[in-house]
Amino acid sequence: MDTVGETRANTAQQFTYEDLRDWIEQADRLGELKRVDGASWEKDIGLAAEIVIREDDGPAVLFDKVPGCPDGFRVLINVFGGTRRNMTLGFPDHLTKQELSQGCFESFVKERKTIPHTIVDEGPVMENVLTGDDIDLMKFPTPMWHPEDGGRYLGTGTYTVTRDPEEGWLNCGAYRAMVHDAKSVGCFMVTGKHGYVHRNKYWARGEPCPVVMVIGGEPIAFFNGGAEAPYGTFELDIVGGIRNKAVECVEGKITGLPFPANAEIVLEGHLHEGKVKDEGPFGEWTGYYASGQHPEPVLEVEAIYHRKDPIILGVPPMGQGTDEMARYRAVLRSAMLKQNLADAGVPDITGVWCHEIGASRLLHGVSIKQRYPGHSKQAGHIAAQCQAANYANRFIIVVDDDIDVSNLEELIWAMCTRCDPATTIDIVKGAWTSPADPRLTPEQKANGDITNSRAIIDACKPFHWKDDYPVTNAPDADVLQEAREKFGYLLD
């Protein structure tokens, strides 16, 4: 089994798109974009999503001429898959998924750079500014993504901007948004997330919480809106660091909050304490309608900004296997987890992978070159609770550096042959999980106890006798290469 090394040559990061429309042109150039006219929002778009999003190399799909909606009002799905995933993150086509994650680690995680956003007066998103009686969310082709969803979810590939009323810092958070009526949407902020903290600070002061919700924008901004950025850091400034130039933003006319000038659709308004409506159920990333129907705060939309012929970015979770959400989170979260471990002083981390099968949250593999007694234990416990992997974590598996942790079969093989369940598995209780966790008991939900346990599995060879551990019968890289060269034709 090979140890995964550094990325191959020619990995300089270079973006070929500025906004979602440029991205569509690039995906089309790669031959990975399909166009569909006439699909219904009631059923067809959701059905198509079920087919293409589950496939690692499924195409991106752009829907237009949706019945009941203006022509040119479009929906784009399945951004992160195939070769276009590399283009999306600004890397060459030839990188594997783990090399792509390593490229992200080297380029913008290892030494996280931020470039503050700048404010401009105008931008394409201001082509249409709707207020008062002109506000109508129903004109957008918002799909019913899953058969049992409680409503149409306009916000899946979305992020919401808030400002801390005491400290002044800005935050982007990926909070789903269900359409209630022509002028209001839900805003489901999970307990403990930064937007939730900001919202409750406003309410404690007796003030409504101002928000802007970006519905369609360039993918890098959305990806970072859903990532675990450090407290006090504005994700759009992280995007500036990734792109090596400031994100140009306009300010909302009602809240003054910034949002990208090249965004597709933006909703602006306030969250008022006590103004709630039932939200959900929704087909969650865990593969269940787990959080059910429950009251959540409502964004009373006071302004809509949108480009001519606007595009909804749809990123619905599919669950029960790998989907788009799991794919992009795996690449980015693996890089972030590797840095968290290094920041905590864990040496010789040779590989990290947040597995797609667990939506990049439930199952994490970490490989190390063992240096001292307890090294594997240290790596496992820190990985179980650090910022990148704390939320909704379930299993951490720590293995030796001969295992490719991105290969699920190798990871589980190491667990099966090097872990002793009675002595090398630790259980941590009372950790932070998600309302989407299907294992939350009815009593926990009723009590607001959104916690779980997690297993830290030491699947390394025991340090004090690792040199005497039986030798594996797997071929080394040279033997495997020779076998492929001589007899690879047998697989053709």
Image (spheres, rainbow, N blue to C red):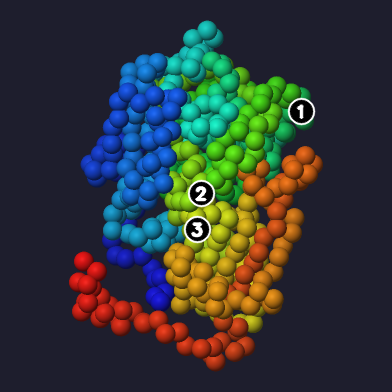
Mark 3 falls on what kind of element?
Answer: loop
Residue at 56 percent across and 41 percent down: it is 284
Relative height, residue 374 to residue 453 (above, below) = below
Residue 197 placement (x, y as % from top left): 69, 38
Q: Which mark is residue 355?
A: 3
Provide the residue designation for mark 1: 205
Label whose residue precedes the other's in the sequence (1 or 2): 1
The 10 Å Cα crowd at callout 1, few under 14, some 14 to 19, many 20 or more, is few
Quadrant containing the N terminus in the rendered view: bottom left
Q: Is residue 322 left or right of residue 391?
A: left
**In terms of sequence position, does the residue under pointer 1 or pointer 3 come before the other?**
1
Is 19 situated left or right of 406 in this image? left
For label 2, the residue is 320
Spatial distance from mark 3 to mark 2, Cα to Cα?
13 Å
Is residue 327 found left or right of 90 in the rendered image? right
For image coordinates 58% across by 28% down, the residue present is: 150
Residue mark closest to the camera, 3 vs 2 = 2
In the rendered structure, which amino acid carries the disc numbered 2?
A: Gln
User: Mark 2 or mark 3, which is nearer the start of the sequence?
Assistant: 2
Q: Residue at x 66, y 74 (%)?
A: 421
Residue at the extreme top of the image, as rendered: 133
Type of amino acid at the residue the image marks with label 1:
Arg
Q: Position of residue 380 (x, y in %)?
A: 62, 68
Q: Are marks 1 and 3 in contact (CB under 8 Å)?
A: no
469 or 421, nearer to the observer: 421
Give the vertical position of 243 relative to 301 (above or below): below
**Closer to the observer: label 1 or label 2?**
2
> Residue at the bottom extreme?
468
